[in-house]
Image (cartoon, rainbow, N blue to C red):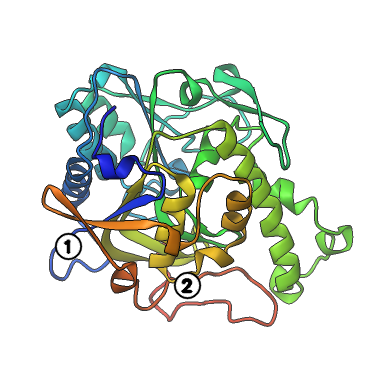
Amino acid sequence: MKMHPLLQDPAAVLVIHNLLPAGAGAAVPWAQFQRAAREALAALQLELDGERVVIKPNVTAGERFQDPDCGIGVHPGFVQGMIEHLVGHGARASRITIAEDPRDTDDNDPRHWRGTGYDTMAPAMGVKLYSPTTYTCVKRPVPRPLAHPVLNVSRLAVQPGAVLLNVPKLKTHNLGITTLCLKNLMGLVNVFDRHYCGQAWKELPEEARSDPRPRGEWLTRELHERWQEGLARRLADTAQVIRPTLNVVEGVVGREGTGFQRGRNRALGWVIAGVNVVAVDSVASYLMGFDPQKLIYLQVATAAGLGESDLGKLRVYAAQGAEFAPCDPAALRADPPFRVISNIVGEDPGLFAEGEQGV
């Protein structure tokens, strides 16, 4: 795989701002997602030479939501646009696989992808849909384990010579605060092993875990941060084993709230890309309104040597035709900042105004 030489630097991140149709609100046409993806990969000057390609979008529980426009997962139109570029620049459709578990249940039953949009898009594009199962995963040692010495991960994701394109959604999360490149890799872990939030929950004191009251009545910031740290260690372990070739955040429409049902969509027209998961997550989190150096999962990942979260040490570029120009990410920052619903006692739960709930 080849790309623009500036983006081969792990400290480099490209931000592309697509102008959306006037009055689009949070409803953006399918074709706009396609166009945004094609323009982003063209700016990256992405070229292949017949390599096997694995695209990992966030389609978490997509079979349950059955709405491509819900904003909770990566829009299938965006992945379609990526495939269109790839096929036109050296990839073969028969060697492209979309890998994700759109159901997120503890079983090896076949996933049907119905209602996600991927079920119709993928066959039309001639690419395969794949969900990691126990039978298609392989165990890999974690070089410097923080929680798991061994991880059972998708064989496709770690096969030699494959191009792994990590494609998360730009959104907030009730535990991680932001959920981007690092957290998106969880979908490539064996379904029985990847419940990182639940695993981290079990590390909290038993008296907290057994409290029958709603979390909003007892979950302190201190406990929430301990819970975040447990998630962060597992994300760092996963990023040591699964190494994306390129990360491309779909922020054409972002989402704020819990990361799932409670929240709303925000049409932004952003695509954020780079080769390093920590650098891309840091820039994307900053654009959403957060200080990346204060996000626990990025602190842990940086300490583990997985990348740099200090924006002062990163090089942020904007695409101007075929050229890149250094840019000030503060000029692109979301206004107002993204809001998170974490159910921490004594804090503003971030409830949206009536009519803003979304799905």
**Farthest front residue in view:** 313
Left or right placement of residue 283 versus residue 96 in this view: right
Q: Nearer the viewer, residue 282 or 88?
A: 282
Counting other residues with Cα less than 10 Å from the Cα at mark 1, is it few (<14), some (14-19), or many (20 or more)?
Answer: some
Looking at the figure, which quarter contains the N terminus? top left
On residue 288, the disc is none
Q: Position of residue 335 (x, y in %)?
A: 34, 77
Looking at the figure, which quarter contains the C terminus? bottom left
Q: Nearer the viewer, residue 103 or 47?
A: 47
**Farthest right residue in view:** 207
Is 119 located above or below residue 19 in the figure?
A: above
Q: How many numbered callouts?
A: 2
Is 310 located above or below residue 54 in the figure?
A: below
Counting other residues with Cα less than 10 Å from the Cα at mark 2, is it few (<14), some (14-19), or many (20 or more)?
Answer: many
On residue 20, the disc is 1
Left or right placement of residue 3 versus residue 72 in this view: left
Identify the residue at horizontal 21%, vertical 29% (top origin). Answer: 47
Who comes first in sequence, dot 1 or dot 2?
1
Q: Where is residue 90 in the image (x, y as percent from the top left)?
A: 19, 23
Disc 2 residue type?
Answer: Arg
Is 135 located above or below residue 152 in the figure?
A: above
Disc 1 residue type?
Answer: Leu
Q: How far apart are marks 1 and 2 (CA)?
A: 22 Å
Badge 1 vs badge 2, beta-carbon distance below 8 Å: no
* Helix, strand or loop for disc 2: loop
Identify the residue at horizontal 51%, vertical 39% (top origin). Answer: 185
Q: Position of residue 64 (x, y in %)?
A: 47, 45
Q: Position of residue 346 (x, y in %)?
A: 68, 82
Q: Mark 2 points at which residue?
A: 339
Q: Quadrant of residue 296?
A: bottom right
